[in-house]
Every structure is written in C-alpha cells, then in structure tokens.
Image (tube, rainbow, N blue to C red):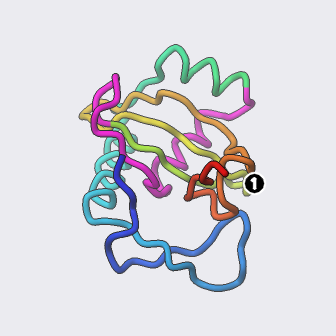
C-alpha cells in the first residue's frame, strides 16, 4: 500500500473542513492513476463487480455519483497486489456533498469493486488517513 504524501501538491480538507489548506500531498504515480481512471470512465471503459453493484444499490448511490467521483476524486491509497489487479481507493464528494470512498481497479477497463461511506471510527476527519489502532 502506497501513501499519497510524497509530492508537493497540497489538497483542501473536505468533510472536516478546517478552513485552511492541509499538508496532504499526492505522489505523481497516484495523480497519474487518477488521470487514467478518469479517462477510462469518461470513455465508458468501466464496469461493476457483482459486489460493487450490490453495495452501490444497497447504499443508495447512483451510477452518476460514482462516475462524478471517479472523474474528479482523489486517489488516497494504492494496492498494487490486490486480487483484482492494481487498485486504488478514491475519495470523492457527490453533488450533494456526501463523502464516499470508491475502490476500483487501475486497468484499461475499470472494475468498480466497492463503494462506501467512510466510517469516522476508521478514518481521520480528512477521510484520507486511516486511524491507527490504539
């Protein structure tokens, strides 16, 4: 799992907006992955896994919301050895301001593996950083 905190690109905090810029940065590798994913989605080269489709419906998330997140979201984690092949966890916001995580593959055809509302007990307020076990 690669962390996104290596380049000099600060990002604005989202859900817990503190009114200032965060020290969060995104590596070139992850920025390039987001561009590839957004381009594939714009070209219609994506599909849902059975689990991804079930979770989208179960959680009341529209296909358009997922498309928007994959078009403009931010890669926060990378899993190069995932069972579906290289995958990325993307943080994005719906038009209504709902913060979501989308796990998808990083291949020529994007597999949307799952989508969920980040659990506050598992994520820091920025929804980008996993809480450490205490």
The answer to whether residue 51 is above or below residue 6 is above
Task: Locate residue 131 relative to residue 49 in the image: left or right.
Answer: right
Q: Residue furthest bottom?
A: 20
Task: Locate residue 34 relative to residue 131 in the image: left or right.
Answer: left
Image location of residue 87, percent across then percent down? 36, 37
The answer to whether residue 100 is above or below residue 14 is above
Image location of residue 122, percent across then percent down? 67, 47
Question: For residue 61: magenta?
Answer: yes
- Residue at image position (35%, 45%) is 37
- Residue at image position (54%, 49%) is 69
Q: Which residue is mark 1?
A: 96
- Residue at image position (59%, 34%) is 115
Magenta region: 59-86
Q: Secondary structure at mark 1?
A: loop
Image location of residue 129, percent across then percent down? 56, 58
Name the quadrant containing residue 9.
bottom left
Number of callouts in the render? 1
- Residue at image position (62%, 18%) is 54
The answer to whether residue 80 is above or below residue 55 is below
């Amino acid at each position: 799992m690669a962390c996104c905190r290596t380049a000099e690109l600060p990002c604005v905090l989202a859900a817990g907006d503190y009114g200032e810029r965060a020290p969060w940065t995104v590596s070139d590798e992850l920025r390039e992955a987001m561009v590839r994913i957004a381009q594939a989605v714009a070209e219609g080269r994506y599909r849902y896994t059975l689990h991804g489709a079930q979770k989208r419906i179960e959680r009341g998330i529209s296909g358009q919301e997922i498309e928007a997140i994959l078009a403009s979201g931010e890669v926060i984690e990378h899993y190069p050895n995932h069972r579906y092949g290289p995958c990325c966890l993307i943080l994005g916001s719906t038009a209504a301001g709902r913060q979501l995580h989308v796990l998808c593959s990083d291949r020529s055809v994007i597999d949307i593996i799952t989508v969920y509302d980040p659990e506050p007990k598992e994520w820091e307020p920025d929804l980008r950083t996993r809480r450490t076990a205490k």
